[in-house]
Amino acid sequence: MAEPRRGILRENEPMAEHASWRAGGPVARAFFPADLADLANFLSVVRHDEPLLLVGLGSNLLVRDGGFDGTAIFTHGALNTLRREADGSFFAEAGVASPKLARFAGKQGCAEAEFLAGIPGTVGGALAMNAGCHGGETWRYVERVLMLNRSGQQIIRGPEEFAIGYRHAGLRNSTDEIFAAAWFRFPPGDVDAARDRMKALLERRVATQPLALPNAGSVFRNPPGDHAARLIEAAGLKGTQIDGAQVSEKHANFIVNPDGAASASAIEMLIGRIQAEVAEKFGISLVREVRIVGDAAGRSGPEREGV
């Protein structure tokens, strides 16, 4: 028999309040688990055909204005265990912010974790998309991962069980599991050097990215041998706007929502325009990094809260 739910379940939850773009329609149901055990219990009782959407910091996500007819699971603030194991590895649950893992590893005298400070999301998102920047990639440092399946069972898997590529990682032989946590191993380093490198990387981010405005990070993957930002700028698209959504003047691979007034459809239309014009002028198809889910048409429903 399943344990009583300890987390919060809400209906018709507006995603504009949770996504870093400050745009997006509602999700039919939103679950905020109390911890990993509570999430496992929830998965064991939810319908097996229920569409699930994992949300960390909402920094790489756009829910269309019509909303998502399923359950969004919010991991940040719940799956937040972070510790150093006796064997020297680092255990981080999926809701831990990537910069927090970077700082923790650096303070423990490890090197090469600094790149995680530049990823504005959680460990779960970093695992799912093999997030990286400044020459580092998440799965280069993963020893094993803890997965949850739709029955709430916890399964430990190694990297060899995943197809891992540029901005993507997925299980080879299963589709019903989600990332719950991972064990990372970083090489030894110097605490002061790690701190200085993180400081330099963050200063570079502030100088080159529109962090003061609502955004979702890099919108497109870099094509082989080139940079999406260079192509977008060369196409003359810097500053281009559609109904409040704007190609950043500071970094062309960012779309910003300066006044928080842009709809999800406006952002998606601007994404499409960028792809079309870059393809027409350079013959290159830009691939999205950001995940777009949900329906374009509007829907409505009652809003309730449960515990």
Image (cartoon, rainbow, N blue to C red):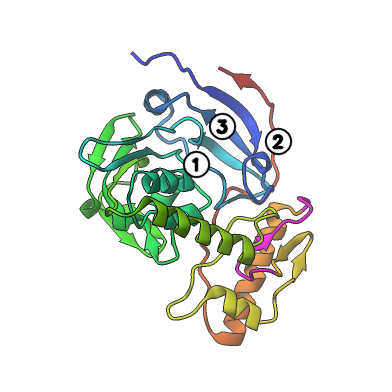
Q: Nearer the viewer, residue 267 or 228?
A: 228
Q: Is residue 26 above or below residue 185?
A: above
Asked if the residues shown at circle 2 and circle 3 are in contact, with their CB atoms under 8 angstroms apart, the answer is no
Which residue in the protein does label 2 denote? 300
Q: What residue type is labelled 1?
A: Leu
Magenta highlight: main SS: loop
Q: In this view, does 195 lie above or below 246?
A: above
- The residue under the point 40% across, 43% down is 104
Q: Distance between the residues labelled 2 and 3?
A: 15 Å
Which residue in the protein does label 3 denote? 30
Q: Distance between the residues labelled 1 and 2?
A: 19 Å
Quadrant containing the N terminus is top left
- The residue under the point 69% across, 59% down is 256
Which residue of the protein is positioned furthest toward the front in this rendering? Answer: 192
Q: Which amino acid does label 3 sit on?
A: Ala
In the figure, is residue 298 to the left or right of 126?
right
Going from the N terminus, do you reach mark 1 or mark 2 first? Answer: 1
Q: Dot 2: few (<14), some (14–19), or many (≥20) neighbours within 10 Å?
A: few
Circle on res. 53: 1
Q: Nearer the viewer, residue 134 or 191?
A: 191
Q: Which amino acid does label 2 sit on?
A: Ser
* Element under disc 1: strand
Asked if the residues shown at circle 1 and circle 2 are in contact, with their CB atoms under 8 angstroms apart, the answer is no
Q: In this view, does 275 lie above or below 123?
A: below
Percent x, y of residue 173: 25, 50
Magenta segment: 250-261
Q: Can residue 211 be seen in this view?
A: yes
Quadrant containing the C terminus is top right
- The residue under the point 73% across, 64% down is 246
